[in-house]
Amino acid sequence: MLFDVNLVDREFYRSRLADFLPDRIVDVHAHVWRRPRVDRSAAAEARTVSWPARVARDGPIEELLETYRLLLPEKAVTPVVFSSPTADEDLDALNDYVSESAAHHTIPALVLAHPSWSGEELEQRVLFGGFLGAKVYLTYAPDYLPSDEIRIFDFLPPHQLRVLDRRGWIAMLHIPRPARLRDPVNLAQLLEIEQRFPNVGLVVAHVGRAYCPEDVGDAFERLSGARRMRFDISANTNEEVFRRLIGAVGPGRILFGSDLPITRMRMRRICEKGLYVNLVPRGLYGDVSGDPHMRELDRPEADRLTFFLYEQLDAFRRAAEGEGLTRADVARVFHETAAGMIERAGAGRAMRPAAPPVPPPGPSGPPPGEPGPADAPVSRRPPA
């Protein structure tokens, strides 16, 4: 089995999540990659946090599909997949694997885009790879920029936005800067994208990295004029942030994303003075003593920890119930809005669940999946 699903996990899912979640789910934010992966440079490390790499060094598509079977039994899940970025790895190889995986399993995918590409190159890579748009990431901003000074347009440049806008494609955006969602530069550029490129399917990942209430500031007041940008709830467990998001944009512009495989982590998240801290079992993720975002727990408290994904879903459930969302509203968050966005992005490929319903877990958990063999690798880059 890929990982253990214990009694604590099964009871958590049964009592809090199984009835809340709709039968059909679209996960708009899932990573897939396969070995080999290289150690990241100091420059790449400076632009990202290091703890996610402790959860999964490898992320093949078969493991993602098996994770849905294990963690979301009896739910039919369709993921939108893209790679996990790093500054030191072959971007073409990363995107080739995603393209091959998506074609083999008939699921939607996004290309991991580099800002140095011309608009024409981005367009050709999306078309030849069968993608629905782009996942952009601050890791690929020019090396000379200090990590705290990176702006959205440094890694999602206007010439690429013009292509995404003309095609009606998706842009999955992980915003930069230490102030996260409340940063005035981020807010100004989000509004500029909304105004100048209205046909882009813009998704602001992780609720703009607002993992604690202090990360929100007056962002939703500043963004009150926006009517099209959407927010995914991936890797976020903050009920207050979710409630503010629901109040600001309503359920029609909120999307479920998991950030798997990272959210396979066993943890519970707290906020202290505006900083998020992941509480994890002692020793499970190596030496975390130097990471301000990680703190270890001893037994018996550690034994009560469940999966990051379950903590995320439960926080959103509490927010949804507190804000009076209906079952139809919840279905919009977890399926309808994303399905419509994918349809509009249009790759002409049928969308079907990647994880068919399975019986609920028994005493030892649900059975492992039996994915078929992968197709032979085929390059999906545009011809030279």
Image: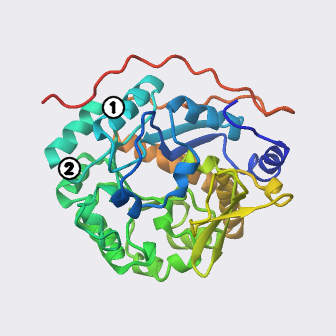
Residue positioned 51% across, 16% down in the render:
373
Task: Give the mark, 2 or 1, whose residue is nearer the N terminus.
Answer: 1
Residue positioned 40% across, 80% down in the render:
222
Q: CA distance from mark 2 to mark 1?
A: 21 Å
Residue positioned 57% across, 75% down in the render:
275
Q: Which residue is mark 2?
A: 163
**Which residue type does callout 2 highlight?**
Val
For label 2, count other residues whose C-alpha is less than 10 Å away and answer few (under 14), some (14-19) or many (20+): many
Q: Quadrant of the C terminus?
A: top left
Residue 22 in percent (x, y) is at: 66, 45
Q: Which residue is mark 1?
A: 96
Residue positioned 65% across, 61% down in the render:
316
Residue 258 in view (yes/no) = no
Residue 197 in percent (x, y) is at: 25, 60
Q: Which mark is residue 37?
A: none
**Which residue type does callout 1 highlight?**
Asp
Residue 327 in view (yes/no) = yes
